[in-house]
Amino acid sequence: MGIAAHYQRFRKGDWVKVKHLGKSGHVRIPFYVRGKRGEIVNFCGRYLNPEDLAVGNTAGPAIDLYRVKFAQGDLWPDEGIPEHDHLVIEIYDHWLSSAESSEGRQ
Amino acid sequence: MPSGNTIDDNSYENHEALVVEDDAGNLEGQIIIDALQEVLVAHGLLTAPEVLKEIEKLESPGVHLGAKIVARAWSDPDYKAKLLENGKQAIGYIGITVGEAQIIVVENTPKKHNLITCTLCSCYPRSILGQPPSWYISKAYRARAVREPRKVLAEFGTILPDDMELIVHDSNADMRYLVLPEPPKNLADMNEVEMELLVTRDRLIGVSR
Amino acid sequence: MNNRNKSENSPRGYHDIGGDAAGAIPKTELPWLHWEKQTEAIRNLLGDGTRRIVSLDEMRRGFESFGAEKYKVLSFYRRRLDAMIDVLIEKQVITREELDAAISKKRVVWSKVARRETP
């Protein structure tokens, strides 16, 4: 059995969007970033999926974990937050889709 | 739906700031954990000496370890670079064993300030700093730190210039965070022990500058 | 401006409070009590490499699913204790009956101590 090459989907600076996965149960992606668009800050490594671990499944695949940076103004549009303030949070690969920068800000 | 609390219930969820056990509650907690430990020991899953040893291990880290890391980074640019590159490894180099998967050290600069929170529960670099302060695990901090961090900082007496970038880190997954505060202006006159004295827990979390 | 339950396809956990409005941050530093340390210690041991009986994520799932009311009224460490117990029972590592029996015995001991101590 060969070892599949690990294909890391995103690189620093890529624009991504957090998916609405519709998952119930234990997830570590807070509601306030769902559907939001941000920028990959760094690749953290591969870790077991907490969604699996929460139900005692330690045999699942390790998932790529990224830190993603969001403009606070995009997360909280009504708050009058300075444009240069940001929030960075860790998002697992399966919660991310690619977002072209030409889409423009939300 | 908000729970049946009629005070202020059209304004917000009315999270109880911090639920504190009274004496009866603490006694109850002690009774239950003692009973649980007894059952687990009876099942051969734990021993009482192991539990005591683990408690000692939990008690030993503290802000003094964070201070040591920061002082070393302030005094040694090479170490600082390693720390920012791979926190867990660099912290290991100075004899501190990190239990968490990775430590991300975020650097404050004259233009940038970092603040750490965990909105989902209370993730904190416990193997380095010990237990987080009560306010860090309060619902008020968890709820507000991401949305109105400047107001939260003001409650701690920290006012940031408007043109400074404020970055909030929500510690939601496998990483844990330490803020590397800005060094003092008279760094060159200090030894590491003097530097360590300047490093407080609140600076390592980011509610103080 | 409460869009907490705004429809999207996922339910939002009651623990998922980032962005909710809340009051002043309580600054009182609470002591870390022995039972709380014991709770952490036991969870750590149960989750360690030799046992893997209750992981951090299983415990989190525990307190994320024991109900909003309970989550609201329990203190931080009591939440973790109750969640750990729920997981242990769910996984049939222990039974509710044997735990309750052990708790009753402990209560008797403590009430005797309390009676001795009150003049």
Image: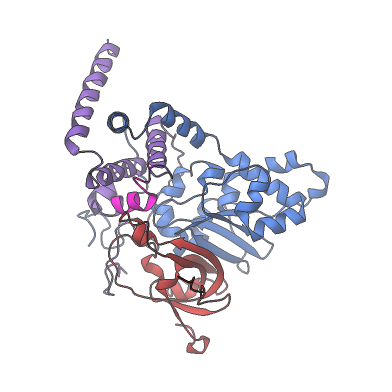
Chain colours: A red, B blue, C purple
Q: Is residue B145 left or right of residue B13?
A: right
Q: Where does the image place residue B183, in percent across and percent down from the top left?
A: 72, 52
In which quarter of the view is residue B2 placed?
bottom left
Which of B76/A74 is in front?
Answer: B76
In which quarter of the view is residue C95 placed?
top left
Question: Is residue B151 covered in magenta?
Answer: no
The image shows residue A101, relative to residue A40, as above or below, that is: below
Q: Where does the image place residue C100, in percent across and percent down from the top left?
A: 19, 32
Q: Is residue B167 left or right of residue B94?
A: left
Which of B45/B56 is in front?
Answer: B45
Q: Is residue B209 visible?
A: no
Residue at the far bottom in the pictured view: A102
Q: Where does the image place residue C59, in percent across and percent down from the top left?
A: 33, 49
Residue at the far left in the pictured view: C97
Region rendered in magenta:
C51-62
Q: What residue is rendered at 33% in x and 57% in y?
A: A57
